[in-house]
Image: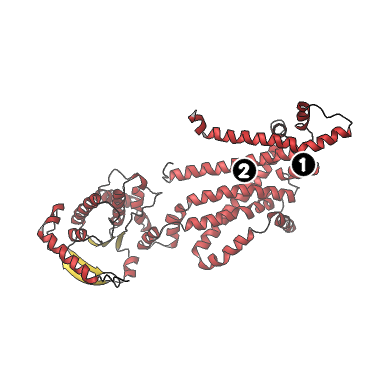
């Protein structure tokens, strides 16, 4: 019994069970008034409780759809749908994924370059960091449309503008994390390199870079999930290319709450897959660097 | 020669208070670090690693990561690293300060053997009087703040020093003189 209670799976399932209960209760609470209004409109008597709950959990356009409605929509829009169809959320998720990954890769590279520059140049350290932090205080929802319109004006369309919104978000944790990571070697290790009369370049490759690996992966985990948010926001702004964000927008125009929730679930799964992928890369790299098994 | 010029010509190997090994490198890769930086060929590196690992009695631990070794072994690895590139001078800054007495004794006698084999000049900083007397042919006693030389003692102990030489009258006489020198340099102000 204690084995079961200590297991991680049990812990996750327990939380999931609580969430489902809360969700189903919310579906009753939020959908009750519209349901009662609809009975009244059609001159129907309010049915007995089991029927009432069944009605509340199966509205076509509920305020809060029940979990099984969302899961059914997820199923229908992925497995139950031809992948080439525009209604396929797999196709849309693929479009969003492409933007996310491209933006994340550019963002990580940009973040690394900035961190290297900041660590090696005192002027850059003082002048760049405040601007980098300021860049993140601008609401992405406000700046995304302007960037997309701006990119459009100079002939940049399609995947790249969207990816650049992801880049705008995802470079930040990489800069901050890697500046710290590159500075993580202790004074003794730096002194050691000094006694070898090692160049800055050598100190960077032999000491700062390997020492910063744990920081890199932590930053990348944050970066990849906000890159996804960037791609979704970009799609809300520029609907021409499709993607999960566009489905979210059309769902909201048409009051298809079930579709919107299904999109959210798929976006969440996408984020989880991306973070797990970075986590696996982390395990592999750190293990090959002799990390002590936990 | 200025300290700057000595550093630039890589004429000393340095052993710190702590091993300062790079945790992502195996022991042999740690020893190889200065060799890589100074541009020795792979074959040369291999030969030197084998030689220095043997000198510090770590043969067989080449592929281990630092966390897999005890503190004393890690410090020996860092000595191997300082020896690997054959600098003229070996500087040791309280290298065994963080280790327990038994390990320290062991490493001290190992260091004497190492010195006998390599005949390298070693400058060794320590706060321990017995360690200073046991290891040295010349002891420089320094005062703290301001750091001044208060005494220079040429050891009369023979080159071959078993651990129990530390109980001999001759040893104790030198130790006493070192202590006197330290006391002369120290001014313990009661109300500092």
On the rendered structure, is A112 left or right of B41?
right
Graded by Cα atoms within 10 Å as few (under 14), some (14 to 19) or many (20 or more), the crowding at tag 1 reads some
Graded by Cα atoms within 10 Å as few (under 14), some (14 to 19) or many (20 or more), the crowding at tag 2 reads many
The answer to which quarter of the image holds residue A245 is top right
Q: Which residue is mark 2?
A: A271
Q: Residue sitting at 50 percent across and 57 percent down?
A: A180
Q: Secondary structure at mark 1?
A: helix
Q: Quadrant of the C terminus of chain B?
A: bottom left
Q: Nearer the viewer, residue A142 or A45?
A: A45
Asked if both marks, 1 and 2, belong to the same chain, the answer given is: yes
Q: Residue sitting at 79 percent across and 34 percent down?
A: A60
N-terminal-most mark, 1 or 2: 1
On the rendered structure, is B79 left or right of A272?
left
On the rendered structure, is A174 left or right of B135?
right
Q: Nearer the viewer, residue A47 or A96?
A: A47
Residue A293 versus residue B138 in the image, above or below: above
Q: Which mark is residue A270?
A: none
Q: Position of residue A228 (x, y in %)?
A: 64, 47
Q: CA distance from mark 1 to mark 2?
A: 21 Å
On the rendered structure, is A90 left or right of A195?
right
Residue A229 versus residue A81 in the image, above or below: below
Q: Position of residue A6 (x, y in %)?
A: 50, 33
Q: Residue sitting at 73 percent across and 46 percent down?
A: A241
Residue projecting furthest to the left:
B169
Q: Which residue is mark 1?
A: A251
Chain identifier of the residue bearing label 1 in the image: A
Chain identifier of the residue bearing label 2 in the image: A
């Amino acid at each position: 019994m204690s084995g079961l209670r200590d297991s991680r799976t049990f812990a996750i399932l327990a939380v999931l069970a609580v969430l489902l209960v809360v969700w189903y209760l919310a579906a009753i609470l939020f959908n009750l008034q519209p349901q009662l209004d609809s009975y009244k409109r059609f001159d129907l008597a309010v049915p007995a409780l089991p029927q009432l709950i069944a009605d509340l959990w199966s509205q076509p356009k509920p305020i809060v759809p029940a979990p099984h409605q969302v899961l059914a929509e997820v199923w229908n829009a992925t497995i139950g749908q031809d992948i080439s169809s525009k209604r396929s959320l797999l196709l849309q998720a693929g479009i969003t994924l492409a933007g996310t990954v491209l933006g994340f890769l550019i963002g990580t590279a940009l973040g690394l370059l900035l961190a290297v520059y900041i660590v090696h140049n005192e002027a850059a350290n003082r002048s760049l960091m405040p601007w980098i932090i300021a860049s993140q205080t601008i609401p992405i929802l406000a700046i995304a449309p302007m960037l997309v319109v701006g990119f459009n004006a100079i002939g940049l369309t399609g995947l790249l503008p969207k990816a650049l919104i992801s880049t705008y978000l995802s470079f930040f944790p990489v800069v901050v994390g890697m500046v710290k990571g590159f500075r993580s070697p202790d004074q003794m290790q730096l002194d050691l390199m000094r006694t070898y009369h090692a160049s800055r370049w050598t100190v960077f490759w032999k000491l700062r870079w390997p020492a910063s690996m744990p920081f890199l992966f932590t930053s990348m985990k944050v970066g990849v999930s906000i890159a996804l948010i960037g791609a979704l926001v970009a799609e809300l702004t520029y609907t021409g290319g499709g993607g999960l964000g566009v489905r979210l927008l059309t769902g909201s125009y048409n009051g298809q709450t079930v579709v919107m929730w299904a999109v959210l679930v798929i976006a969440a799964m996408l984020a989880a897959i991306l973070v797990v992928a970075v986590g696996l890369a982390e395990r592999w790299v750190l293990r090959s660097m002799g990390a002590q098994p936990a | 020669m200025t300290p700057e010029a000595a550093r630039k010509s890589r004429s000393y190997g340095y052993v710190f208070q702590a091993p300062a090994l790079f945790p992502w490198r195996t022991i042999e890769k740690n020893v190889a670090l200065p060799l890589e930086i100074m541009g020795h060929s792979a074959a040369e590196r291999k030969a030197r690693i084998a030689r220095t690992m043997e000198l510090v009695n770590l043969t067989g631990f080449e592929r281990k990561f630092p966390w897999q070794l005890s503190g004393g072994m890690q410090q020996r690895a860092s000595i191997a690293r300082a020896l690997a590139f054959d600098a003229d001078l070996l500087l040791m800054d309280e290298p065994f300060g963080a280790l327990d007495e038994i390990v320290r004794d062991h490493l001290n006698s190992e260091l004497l053997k190492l010195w006998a084999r390599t005949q390298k000049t070693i400058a060794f900083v320590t706060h321990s009087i017995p360690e200073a007397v046991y290891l040295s042919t010349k002891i420089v006693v320094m005062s703290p703040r301001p750091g001044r030389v208060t005494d220079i003692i040429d050891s009369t102990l023979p080159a071959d020093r078993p651990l129990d030489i530390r109980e001999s009258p001759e040893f104790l006489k030198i130790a006493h003189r070192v202590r006197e020198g330290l006391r002369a340099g120290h001014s313990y102000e009661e109300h500092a």
